[in-house]
Amino acid sequence: MKRNKVIVTTVLSALLVGGTVTGFMQVPEKAKAKESVLVKADKNQNNLVIINKTASENLEEISSTFTINIPVIENESNISSLQRINTIMDYEIIDFKNRLRNQFAQTYLDLNGEVSFGFSGDVTYEVTFNNDKIVSIPVTYTQYTGGAHSNTEIVGYNFNLETGEVIYVSDLFKSDFHFQKEINNKIKEEISKQPEGYFEDALVTVDRLDVNFNYFIKDNAIVVQFKAYELSSYSSGLPSFEIPLKDFENDLTPIGKSIISTKK
């Protein structure tokens, strides 16, 4: 089958706003934003062409910096579907930036400007899977608002390239297959191999996992991604579990089967 050529670029979409952010509080008048844009070399990944543009904002008066990357997907077909995907990604990332910027400003005002640390917010992404039907992009959101360490969360965004719709994990399996139980069991099996690395109630937490949990696709597997402190201490990192879809081959929907039929 002939593959569509999908182009992923990173752009700055109304990110760098000095003074007042519409719908958000005003930062101190002296806080002037210094902006810079860095374009890195193109990189080939599978059938993707990635042009990485990093946009930075520095508000010196409230000691805050942002480095924001937004993926934009383009090709010659499925234009309306891709516009839908790009709108979702754009909204999610800019919303994170605006909420964080507002939080920085509020903290600055609460402390009467006596801030002894620098605020920061960063967004990066990686395209971990792409075929004719699916693109999977885990986005890493990092923020530092004081304290012993920064806070990081990885959110998986999985889209149907033909329709522009979000692909929930339930979309990968046949309706009569109890995929959540099977996946939970695999995760608990991995935890049981090294229980000292997890909280005592980690297995209970896994059983409470939402039916459409946070995941992304990598190679021929799904990666179930947890937040910090959900299963283990911060020092253990962000727990994730790679589940090969080949193990459920007979219970996959057509779009699920397209993942395992894609060559690594």
Image (cartoon, helix red, strand yellow):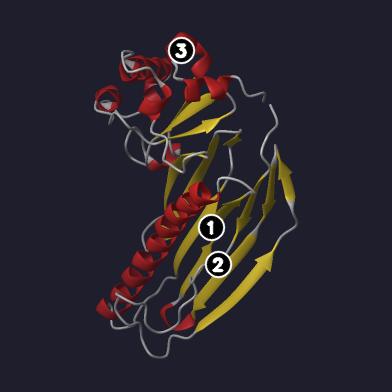
Q: Which element carries disc 2, helix, strand or loop?
A: loop
Residue 12's disc is: 2
Q: Residue furthest top?
A: 250
| Image quadrant assignment for residue 61 | bottom left
Task: Name the residue located 46 percent from the left edge and 44 percent from the top edge.
Answer: 164
- Disc 1 crowd rating (10 Å Cα; few below 14, some 14-19, many 20+) is many
Residue 70's disc is: 1
From this view, report whether residue 69 is shown above or below residue 165.
below
What amino acid type is highlighted by mark number 3? Answer: Phe
- Disc 3 crowd rating (10 Å Cα; few below 14, some 14-19, many 20+) is some
Q: Residue 155 location, x and y as percent? A: 43, 44
- The quadrant the N terminus occupies is top right
Q: Residue 134 location, x and y as percent? A: 54, 35
Is tag 3's residue or tag 2's residue first in the polypeptide sequence? Answer: 2
Q: Nearer the viewer, residue 105 or 213?
A: 213
> How far apart are the two marked residues, 2 and 1, measured between alpha carbons?
7 Å
| Camera sees residue 206 | yes
- Disc 2 crowd rating (10 Å Cα; few below 14, some 14-19, many 20+) is some
Q: Residue 152 location, x and y as percent? A: 43, 50
Residue 154's disc is: none
Q: Which element carries disc 1, helix, strand or loop?
A: loop
Q: Is residue 212 left or right of residue 221?
A: left
What amino acid type is highlighted by mark number 1? Answer: Ile
Is tag 2's residue or tag 1's residue first in the polypeptide sequence? Answer: 2
Q: Which element carries disc 3, helix, strand or loop?
A: helix
